[in-house]
Image: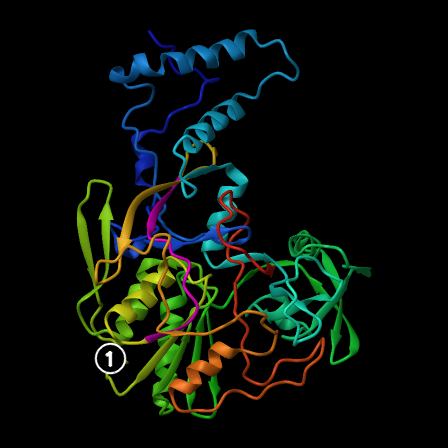
Amino acid sequence: MLPTTTPQDPIPPTADDRARTRRRDVAPSRISLMLVAALAGGALFVGGYSLGAHVATTPGTPANQEARFGPFWDVYSLINADFAGSPRPDQDKLVQAAIDGMMKSLNDQWSYYQGPTDFQNSLLNVGGQAEGIGVQIQLQPVDPSSTQSCTTIGGGCELAILATIPGSPAASADIQAGDVISTVDGIGLDGLTIDQAIAKIKGTQDTSVALGLVRAGKLVEVSVVRKIYTATEVVTKTLEGSVAYIQVTGMNEPASSQFHTALAAALAAGQKNIILDLRGNLGGYVEDAVKIDSEFIGSGTIVYQVDAGGKTTAIEAVKGGIATDPSIHLVVLVDGNTASSAEILSGALQARGRAKLIGTKTYGKGLVQEWLPLPNNFGGIHLTVARWLTPDKVWIQGKGLQPDVPVDTSNPRAGIDPVVDAALAQFGLPPLPVPSAGPGTSAAPGASGSPTPSAAPTQSPQAVPSPTAS
């Protein structure tokens, strides 16, 4: 007979725990609660997810599993009773380690355990919030014509600001795309990797960081207070006087409503050439991807979901889209950090012939994760539960979406955007003005970096490089 649950033992969830809200990473059984996101090293992880609950129907070990779980309980009891090492084992940590071991045994980079703090931070960030100052950065050669590969700062390489994240502390400070970071808190950065520089910039909430910025050859000192901030999901501007540029940085809950407002404003202004920028968009709610797709696709399948049992479910377009008229021309900008529900969005537009994809191959995550909070403040797990397919039933896992108009983005420069220029060419328009060369040059008006917003804290599978220090 196995030991019964005591106050010292882990307490399995009751049936009431199953009433917790469920959200799913990719195509879900309840689309309104689905998420597809990509979290990696401070960025959203590529895939979908949902919030679920423990599925145990009764406390304790099921009768038909007693033999299987006997060795586990024996080891757990022996450690608690007889381990003579120091310090004494923490019983909660023993159980958390067991859960962690089970998840690692799956050999799936998308299925893993997080402790209470990390799991709560994950939920915070997929809710559209992040902690830090909110800048997007990259390593680049000091010489714009150089083809040098940069791995550390110095020796002909510099750390440049791609953009500030809308709604972040940096967006309210005097920080501009094209600025070069020369010092952090008065200390130079030569010899550091980009990850080491990010660690110095990110810091602790409610503390300030002083950045020394080189701008057009002059040194500018800026102090920014690190905060938890809610990032704007949708950024808009007009290019070349007639093109509506709409950047969607994530697929969190406000995304589709903010996009609808931006699109309606563009159409009301007579703008029928639309650039939808999904670069750096690592995913979020499937519902938001479907709603944005439905603005341009009037009916039919947006995405298919295939569950663990092989059942395929088609998720259809939502009626009432305001840009289904083919006279409204759409192009979509993508890159290697366009992932998960952002790939659902761009993949449907491409497969249905509604838009061309411009840029580089997308990340390629066609799996669905469910995020399950565990009871008793034990954190939570991310578990792969399904996969998703494009409307032409293509599984993009590990392959990504190929752009219709490939653009060479090697040796990029902050403040210059060849992908936007290629998009403008689709409308018969000239490229954006080119800023003068040199370190610390401000971005040209209307220029856009390739964003990789920091929408989540560091996750265990580091699948996507993140040039974000937020």
Q: Can residue 253 be seen in this view?
A: yes
Residue 154 vs residue 455: left or right?
Answer: right
Give the x, y percent position of residue 365: 37, 53
> Residue 120 at x, y = what percent?
50, 44
Identify the residue at horizontal 68%, vertical 69% (top origin): 141
Magenta stretch, residue numbers: 356-372
Q: Where is residue 435 in the image (x, y as percent from the top left)?
A: 63, 85
Q: In which quarter of the image is the N terminus?
A: top left
- Against 165, is 236 above or below? below
Going by the numbered disc 1, the residue's amino acid type is Thr
Give the quadrant of the C terminus.
Answer: bottom right
Quick one: label 1, few (<14), some, or many (20+) residues within 10 Å? some
Residue shown at 52%/65% (left/top)? Answer: 231
- Whether residue 24 appears in this view of the structure is no
Q: Is 169 displayed left or right of 46 in the figure?
A: right
Q: Classify residue 11 by image quadrant.
A: top left
